[in-house]
Image (tube, rainbow, N blue to C red):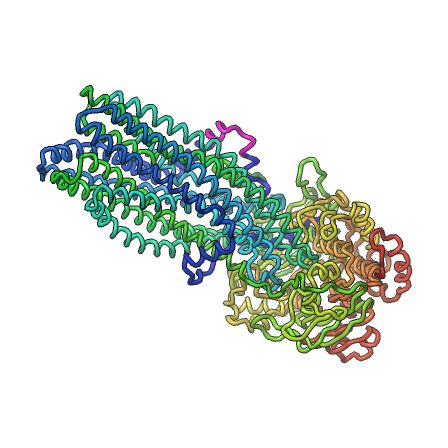
């Protein structure tokens, strides 16, 4: 039942390269992010307080060394002093370690909770965006908004952010202690690090660029891999594995070269930091000894300074690494925020909205125009009325605008001008909950979830029993087809329904819409891949079960038009004809007449 | 996304993971021995200089600072030497960092690239049947994130190895200095090491769980966004969000669990060396009183504990990454070791003069292996036999799901039959070379696949002997020349990922042109013209059936529903449930095979027999268990 060619339908699940980031500062992004996740501020003061205590622990050892040397060693050995110093320091370390634990625990709980909410909100938001917007983005990049981008933020907040805060704190504490010992030596350390900071900042910018290239190349690589997997049948059928291999190799090596370039820049940064550390150490020794000779500094203080310099180097180096990651994380955060900031252009009026009146729905288009953003008009000033309970077919050549009809009617898109009304209520004022339960569309590509037939059909109405589902298939005249499946209702349809043929997928999608029991059913070439006999059978049963509801079918095959109460003929964005089939065919020179002649030509 | 790190890790003991992880690292070293040697020796240099720096600092304090401060006079020579020594060590450390990080990075990236190449090569070599058994998402992550995970521990590996050497050196230098201080080292360093090991062993299962949940969260997002239209039209956004939120919540909990563990170990790992330094202060003072060591030595050892704390964590990083690496490697090697080949033969067909090829199916059976072992496989075709004589057109007709697309795939050998033979020009397709096969038969699939490339590349596919003229000729034949000419860059227009910038019909005609450009001797159309105007289809078929010389250019096997298409066929093969029920001319079958007649005349019957509507009308709503109210 699986058809080899169906593989081509697989949409590649590809994370994509991102466009250059908008010029927003890191600070602005973080403020936007914090505004969006007020949870992040919960207990922030406490967490920062704990972090501060934790940092103090880092300066404890150099201070202990200085105290020990000056008071317990140099001025005559005094083990008692040493014991006191060690005991006090150990006690301090116990407290700071405990604070470290509490700080991390709080931080992780708060940040994970906040970001899980961001993730869920972004997910919902993507679904709330209009179909147009969803289609304009690559599927993979939308997925990465709720997966890898959010992961990057947590990664940054926890590994990078904590390390950054701790290290900056360590830097501050170290600087304070150093100043307390000797301002001259502190200046030496600063003099050694200042040029390094400048160089590192410059490298940072280059590195950000280099990482941008890596991201882009990674996107290209994923695209190439996706193509080789999804396009496997085509590659096989045309014997072009050589060409495909070449394209893959280019993408693979392109990414590797970009990665290598990035690491070269990154290594330069850490080397500069290390050299600065060497300079600082040497400078501290030279000046420290000179000052010591003047009795400005004690031996313990000079020694403590040497320890402090290493405490100073580490944060600078680690911060360099973390800042690289931070760039990625901030970019990720920005992308998530940008998605959340997009106002859904087809918005649910929500509480302010209205319910659709009970009973069958009638349709009215009032001066409706539509054009895709930046595109030519697709529909020009369409006005029409369709009474409740009627069965209408919309026909026209490919590109005539008939599918746009269906999308406007189900409010997948809003008209550029004019209004669509259902039973007198303007669509944009109808609450989505009401609209979606009363108006259902079956698209041509009836997407199936990786689950059983039953679970797919039950999608809109989880409460239905297996018996009811089986009854629905029987009513649709599909009982024999269902029985022929390996496990009947419980047959797994595979990823995107690929275990079924294209036509079979459409049958399941139709059943799914049927059990949803809408008052207005919109079929957008919903049976285009089904064989004629099954289609005709479906047509009849649908007619039977659609009595009492309004049906609008975008027709691929004119058999649908023949069975409809009324046919609406669309040509180049305008309604050119309207009426029952029998009436319309009387003029063989009309658009419908020609369409019908062509239809006859292919069917008999 | 079916195989996840969690499952494969949880089922194994951590000792096993360690052994297997080390084996994976060993493989990496064998693959890139030279780069690894450079990285490790740089790392050892770095380690040695780190230990050396401690002793230089000690010596500087003991031999320069103390005398200077005590005597109040600066020894310029000693001071200069100290400064040079400290700076010199820094320069050597920089050299070490340079070699270590560049080496590690290059090694990691080269291995990633090499294995991505190998995995994707396997994708190209393995038969389509293998592809069918594996989810797209799994194959994508095998080549991408699994390869990445497998070589992840390479980044900290040289650092870790260098650190091990450094630890040995540090303990040795401690013994040289003083046995009592060495004992402190022997207590602290192994404890630090043990703490790291304990940390990574506890972390591994939590990380694996988080990783598995991450994949599941991503899987839900993928599927849900793919089906966004259905979700939207059925108003199921809230339920889909609930489904996502449930898994996202689990992920959050597992990440918090990871965080708590970190909260315990990270501060401990920081504090332990500090405690070591304090112990050195006490023990050192005692030994100083005993006259066993000097102040310089005491300071050296204290300093050593401070600078060693950080590198020791590199060992922990490697250990922490091992489980992920093993899981990634398992999934990568599943592809690399996958059996199943579809070898090509060495026979070539004689094409000295262009003429149509014949296609013969003899007793062909086909089925799919079950997704899980205990389920029954599905038989798709049973004993299918028919012939497409050279130069003839045969239509394949049958109801939805009767196996037509499978026959199309078998005809161009995308898959091999379980039994029976498929022959081109009387030669079993399994005996043909790849070039001969693809040069002879071309398939146009039901769902067009377009590469993210130019129009030209999509039509020509870099096949030899297809120039721009041929591309245009093929486009013209497929009636695609008009829209291509109107594209902004003509043949050079990029069509976007999966051809998103084109309409469905345009994509279909582009793939049709692709098939025609190769001048196949057998053309297999799998309902490939459904979006093409019937007149266009008729013109295409007519063009193929008679070349300039009047003789047919190609044989055609066409899957069709349209009667106009069927009418063009010399013979019709009628299928039902994977079996050939009838063969013959359209008119014959129409008269003799009721199933066939029902299928192809369905529309006419619908028209002439409206009475049926009435019967359904009465039956349907009554039997309906769920359509309770027809009128609200």
Identify which residue, A150 or A5, lies in the foreground: A150
**Which quarter of the picture shows residue B72?**
top left
Disc count in the image?
0
> Can residue B546 be seen at all in this image of the molecule?
no
> Can residue B580 be seen at all in this image of the molecule?
yes
Task: Give how far across and how far down residue B275 sits, in percent.
Answer: 33, 29
Asked whether, in this view, residue A428 is left or right of residue B65, the answer is: right
Identify which residue, A336 or B164, lies in the foreground: A336
Name the magenta segment's main secondary structure. Answer: helix
A488 lies above or below A574:
above
Task: Give how far across and how far down residue A377 sits, in percent.
Answer: 62, 75
Assess whether residue A467 is covered by the magenta stretch. Answer: no
Task: Give how far across and how far down residue B40 sits, in percent.
Answer: 32, 36
A283 lies above or below A76:
below
Assess whether residue B10 is covered by the magenta stretch. Answer: yes
Of the 4 image quadrants, the one containing the N terminus of chain B is: top right
Of the 4 image quadrants, the one containing the C terminus of chain B is: bottom right
- At a point 73% along the width and 58% down the height, the residue shown is A437
- At a point 35% along the width and 38% down the height, the residue shown is B36
Q: Residue furthest top?
A: B290
In the image, the segment drawn in magenta is B9-20
- At a point 19% along the width and 42% down the height, the residue shown is A284
Identify which residue, A530 or B269, lies in the foreground: B269
């Amino acid at each position: 039942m699986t058809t080899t060619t169906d593989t081509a339908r697989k949409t590649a699940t590809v994370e994509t390269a991102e466009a250059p980031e908008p010029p927003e500062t890191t600070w602005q992004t973080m403020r936007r992010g914090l505004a969006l996740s007020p949870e992040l501020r919960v207990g922030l003061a406490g967490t920062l307080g704990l972090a501060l205590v934790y940092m103090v622990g880092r300066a404890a050892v150099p201070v202990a060394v200085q105290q020990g040397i000056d008071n317990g060693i140099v001025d005559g050995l005094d083990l008692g002093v040493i014991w006191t110093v060690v005991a006090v320091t150990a006690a301090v370390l116990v407290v700071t370690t405990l604070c470290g634990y509490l700080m991390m625990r709080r931080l992780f709980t708060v940040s994970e909770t906040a970001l899980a909410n961001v993730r869920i909100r972004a997910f919902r938001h993507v679904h709330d965006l209009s179909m147009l917007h969803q289609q304009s983005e690559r599927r993979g990049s939308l997925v990465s908004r709720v997966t890898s981008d959010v992961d990057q933020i947590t990664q940054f907040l926890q590994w990078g952010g904590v390390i950054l805060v701790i290290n900056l704190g360590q830097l501050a504490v170290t600087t304070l202690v150093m100043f307390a010992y000797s301002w001259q030596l502190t200046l030496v350390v600063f003099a050694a690090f200042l040029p390094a900071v400048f160089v590192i900042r410059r490298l940072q910018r280059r590195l950000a660029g280099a990482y941008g290239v890596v991201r882009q190349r990674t996107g290209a690589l994923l695209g190439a891999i996706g193509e080789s997997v999804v396009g496997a049948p085509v590659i096989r059928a045309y014997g072009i594995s050589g060409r495909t291999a070449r394209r893959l190799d280019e993408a693979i090596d392109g990414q590797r070269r970009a990665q290598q370039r990035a690491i070269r820049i990154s290594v330069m940064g850490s080397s500069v930091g290390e050299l600065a550390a060497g300079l600082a150490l040497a400078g501290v020794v030279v000046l420290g000894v000179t000052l010591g000779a003047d009795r400005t500094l004690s031996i313990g203080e000079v020694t403590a300074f040497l320890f402090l310099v290493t405490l100073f180097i580490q944060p600078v180096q680690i911060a360099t690494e973390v800042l690289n990651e931070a760039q990625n994380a901030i970019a990720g955060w920005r992308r998530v925020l940008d998605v959340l900031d997009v106002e859904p252009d087809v918005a649910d009026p929500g509480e302010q909205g209205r319910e659709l009146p009970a009973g069958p729905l009638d349709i009215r288009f009032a001066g409706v125009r539509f054009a895709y953003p930046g595109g030519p008009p697709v529909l020009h000033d369409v006005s029409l009325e369709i009474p409740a309970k009627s069965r209408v077919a919309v026909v026209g050549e490919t590109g005539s605008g008939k599918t746009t009809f269906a999308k406007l009617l189900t409010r997948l898109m809003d008209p550029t001008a004019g209004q669509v009304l259902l039973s007198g209520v303007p669509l944009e004022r109808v609450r989505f909950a009401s609209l979606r339960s009363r108006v259902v569309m079956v698209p041509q590509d009836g997407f199936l979830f990786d689950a059983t037939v039953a679970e797919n059909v039950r999608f809109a109405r989880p409460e239905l029993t297996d018996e009811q589902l089986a009854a629905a298939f029987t009513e649709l005249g599909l009982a024999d087809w269902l029985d022929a499946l390996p496990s009947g209702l419980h047959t797994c349809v595979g990823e995107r329904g690929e275990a079924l043929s294209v036509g079979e997928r459409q049958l399941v999608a139709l059943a799914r819409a049927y059990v949803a029991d809408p008052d207005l059913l919109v079929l957008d070439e919903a049976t285009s891949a089904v064989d004629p006999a099954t289609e005709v059978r479906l047509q009849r049963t649908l007619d039977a079960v659609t009595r009492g509801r309004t049906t609008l079918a975008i027709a691929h095959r004119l058999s649908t038009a023949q069975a409809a109460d009324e046919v609406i003929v669309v040509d180049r964005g305008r309604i050119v004809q309207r009426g029952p089939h029998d009436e319309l065919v009387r003029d063989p020179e009309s658009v419908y007449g020609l369409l019908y002649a062509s239809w006859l030509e292919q069917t008999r | 996304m079916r195989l996840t790190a969690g499952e494969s890790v949880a089922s194994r003991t951590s000792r096993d993971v360690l052994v297997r992880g080390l084996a994976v690292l060993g493989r990496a070293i064998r693959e890139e021995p030279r780069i690894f040697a450079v990285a490790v020796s740089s790392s050892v240099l770095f380690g040695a200089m780190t230990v050396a720096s401690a002793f230089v600092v000690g010596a500087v304090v003991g031999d320069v600072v103390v005398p200077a401060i005590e005597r109040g006079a600066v020894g310029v020579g000693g001071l200069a030497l100290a400064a040079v020594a400290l700076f010199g060590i820094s320069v050597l450390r920089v050299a070490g960092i340079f070699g270590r990080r560049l080496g590690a990075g290059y090694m990691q990236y080269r291995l990633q690239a090499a294995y991505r190449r190998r995995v994707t090569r396997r994708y190209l070599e393995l038969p389509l049947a293998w592809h069918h058994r594996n989810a797209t998402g799994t194959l994508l992550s095998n080549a991408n994130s699994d390869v990445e995970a497998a070589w992840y521990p390479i980044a900290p590996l040289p650092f870790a190895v260098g650190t091990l050497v450094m630890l040995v050196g540090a303990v040795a230098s401690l013994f040289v200095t003083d046995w009592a201080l060495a004992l402190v080292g022997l207590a602290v360093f192994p404890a630090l090491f043990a703490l790291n090991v304990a940390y990574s062993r506890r972390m591994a299962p939590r990380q694996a769980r988080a990783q598995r949940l991450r994949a599941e969260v991503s899987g839900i997002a993928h599927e849900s966004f793919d089906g966004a239209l259905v979700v939207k039209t059925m108003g199921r956004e809230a339920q889909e969000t609930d489904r996502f939120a449930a898994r996202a919540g689990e992920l959050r909990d597992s990440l918090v669990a990871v965080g708590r563990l970190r909260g315990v170990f990270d501060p401990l790992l920081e504090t332990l060396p500090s405690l070591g330094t304090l112990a050195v202060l006490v023990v050192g003072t005692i030994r100083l009183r005993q006259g066993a060591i000097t102040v310089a030595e005491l300071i050296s050892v204290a300093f050593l504990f401070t600078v060693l704390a950080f590198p020791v964590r590199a060992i922990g990083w490697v250990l922490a990454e091992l489980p992920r690496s093993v899981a990634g490697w398992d999934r990568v090697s599943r592809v690399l070791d996958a059996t199943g080949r579809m070898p090509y033969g060495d026979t070539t067909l004689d094409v000295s003069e262009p003429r149509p090829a014949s296609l013969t199916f003899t007793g062909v059976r086909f089925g799919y292996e079950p997704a899980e072992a205990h389920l029954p496989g599905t038989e798709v075709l049973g004993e299918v036999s028919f012939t497409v004589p050279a130069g003839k057109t045969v239509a394949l007709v049958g109801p939805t799901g009767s196996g037509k697309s499978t026959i199309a795939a078998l005809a161009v050998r995308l898959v091999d039959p379980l039994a029976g033979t498929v022959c081109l020009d009387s030669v079993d397709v399994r005996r043909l070379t790849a070039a001969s096969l693809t040069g002879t038969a071309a398939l146009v699939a039901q769902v067009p696949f377009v590469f993210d490339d130019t129009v030209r590349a999509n039509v020509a596919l870099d096949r030899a002997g297809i120039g721009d003229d041929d591309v245009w000729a093929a486009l013209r034949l497929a009636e695609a020349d008009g829209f291509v000419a109107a594209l902004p860059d003509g043949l050079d227009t990029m069509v976007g990922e999966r051809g998103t910038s084109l309409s469905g019909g345009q994509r279909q005609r582009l793939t049709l042109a692709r098939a025609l450009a190769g001048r196949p001797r057998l053309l297999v159309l799998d309902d490939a013209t459904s979006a093409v105007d019937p007149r266009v289809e008729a013109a295409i078929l007519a063009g193929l059936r008679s070349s300039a010389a009047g003789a047919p250019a190609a044989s055609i096997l066409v899957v069709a529903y349209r009667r106009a298409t069927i009418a063009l066929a010399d013979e019709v093969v009628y299928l039902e449930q994977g079996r050939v029920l009838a063969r013959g001319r359209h008119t014959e079958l129409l008269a003799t095979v009721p199933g066939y007649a029902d299928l192809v005349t369905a529309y006419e019957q619908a028209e002439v027999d409206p009475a049926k509507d009435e019967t359904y009308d009465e039956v349907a709503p009554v039997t309906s268990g769920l359509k309770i109210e027809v009128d609200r």
